[in-house]
Amino acid sequence: MEPDQPFPSESALLREFGVSRVTIRRALAALEADGLIRRVKGKGTFVGSKPAKITPKLTGFTEELLAWKHNTRAKLLELVPVKATRDVATSLGVAEGDIVIRIKRIRYVDQTPLAYIVAHLAKKIGPLVLGDDLERTPIVTLLSKYGIPIVEARQTIEATLADGEMASLLDVKVGAPLLQIVRVYYTDKGDPVDYVRSFYRSDRYQFTVTLKRGSLNKPWEAV
């Protein structure tokens, strides 16, 4: 739904989901607290303008969007073997110059580009997914399908600026602020298999972490 679009009434939601009015009101209160809807006295409820926030968990980006029931699709731009750069080689535990499989995609939400995603798969892993629909199925899901369970991921988040290529692909101006997330996926044996650099439009994506107070040795813990 687009920002400022009228949001369904309580009665309409009751008919659609078949739950109690208390449940509907709690859900609406949560949406309002997150800025996803706004209520205007005497006029009704409307979709908010705040970008969706995604709580970190070990899934692929596509799985997160699907969980939020976004109208999402991907466009495959590139699927080629390339020589590993130093960063890719270090992250995947291979030698610099070794062959890896590079996959470039643009992720769209509601027909608007949201993220430019560049994945690198180790040579022994990459060929497994070459025949799959990489525009519809998350790579994390495909790896599990081929008996390569992903149990851990490590990531870094930083700000960056759109260069000419990214600006064109994401429909933003050159120099526009982007959120860059670098993530490495590991198997249950601790082997790195997927190195992903994703560039998100900062006006359409928010990354939220909840911290809980811990012990002196570990004062804060992300949940």
Image (cartoon, helix red, strand yellow):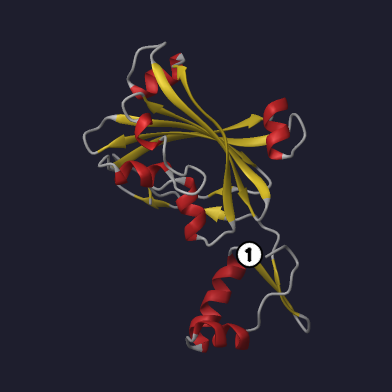
Q: Is residue 44 left or right of residue 154?
A: right
Helix, strand or loop at label 1? It is loop
Question: Callout 1: few (<14), some (14-19), or many (20+) C-alpha neighbours within 10 Å?
Answer: some
Q: Quadrant of residue 177?
A: top right
Could you tell me which quadrant the N terminus lies in? bottom right
Residue 103 in picture, x, y percent from top left = 50, 31
Residue plotted at (58% across, 54% down): 72
Residue plotted at (46% across, 44% down): 133
Residue 44 in picture, x, y percent from top left = 73, 80
Q: Is residue 86 left or right of residue 117?
A: left
- Residue 209 in view (yes/no): no
- Residue 56 in view (yes/no): yes
Residue 46 in picture, x, y percent from top left = 71, 72
Foreground pick, 48 / 130? 130
What residue sits right under mark 1 in the picture? Answer: 36
Circle 1: residue type = Leu
Q: Quadrant of residue 48?
A: bottom right
Residue 93 in picture, x, y percent from top left = 32, 20
